Image (tube, rainbow, N blue to C red):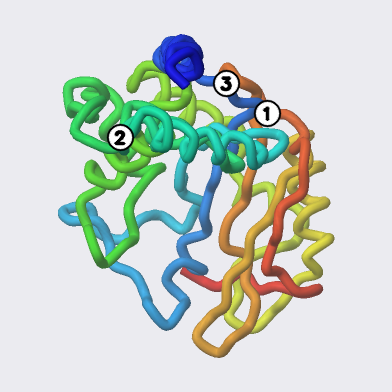
Amino acid sequence: MMKLAIAFVVLLSSFLADSSTAEEFDFFYLVQQWPGSFCDTRQGCCFPDGAGKPAAAFGIHGLWPNYAKCRGRHHREGGGLARAVLGAGDAFLAAVGRRGKCWPEYCGGGGGGHQLSPWDIRDLVASLGRSWPTLSCKNRRSFEFWSYEWKKHGTCSNLDPHDYFARALQLRARHDLAAVLADAGIVPSDTDTYPVDRVRDAIAQGTGFAANLECNRDADGEAQLFQVYQCVDREAKDLIDCPLPMPTKCTDRVKLPVF
């Protein structure tokens, strides 16, 4: 038993060393949401403190590292073995747990480490306010929204805070999704609906790359385009075709509600 424990400690040390350096993932999702669909639900929305109503444009939700294939059961079992052999604590189990999913998260740990500082993004704040606003009524301070996205996703990006946010802004600026859809005759309306395949094709033709779509339901239960998931290379510099599909919650026809 002692030999097994020693061997496990060696393996654990190697694992933790790897975890503290470059995070392994396959691509990013640049997730942009249509504010009309965020607000046109039973929960509604609120506008950022001091900023007022955002523009009627797709806003960034996040830049999320993702695996092309969900990590298997053996990653989760590693946490149980660690607890059984060494009485491993929550910090290690969190490190194991994040590899037992379809994406890494909280790579700086779930505690107070790797907090975003306003100084890190001081030259980006105005652009972030326009392009990455919060619409949540739970917290109307956009900086806290950015801090959450950095802590959960940015710490796994292998980028420093400034590059993480700057590259998300650059990617969004490259293609105005509302304009791309408008060029295909898909414009906000309280009454019209559009074939979801037409929406998907318009984004692929307008940006050059296939994206994934997510829908939600309005207050009357009708499907509406909520978020567009554009796939990005590991350096967060260029769009790529999405390597895997995802559940959409979309029906054959969807709305794009007025904001």
Residue positioned 55% across, 90% down in the render: 220
Residue positioned 69% across, 62% down in the render: 248
| Label ID, residue 89 | 2
Residue 35 is situated, as x and y percent measured from the top left of the image, at: 46, 62
Residue 38 is situated, as x and y percent measured from the top left of the image, at: 46, 66
| Label ID, residue 24 | 3
Q: Could you classify mark 1 by the number of other residues whose Cα lies within 10 Å: few (under 14), some (14-19), or many (20 or more)?
A: many
Q: CA distance from mark 3 to mark 1?
A: 19 Å
Residue positioned 54% across, 32% down in the render: 65
Quickly name the residue at label 1.
239
Where 156 sits versus 22, above or below?
A: below
Foreground label between 3 and 2: 2
Towards the viewer: 197 or 235:
235
Foreground label between 2 and 1: 2
Please, what is the three-letter code of the amino acid marked with disc 1? Answer: Leu
In which quadrant of the rendered view does residue 44 lie? bottom left
Where 53 sits versus 159, above or below?
A: below
Q: Tell whether label 1 touches label 2 (CB within 8 Å).
A: no
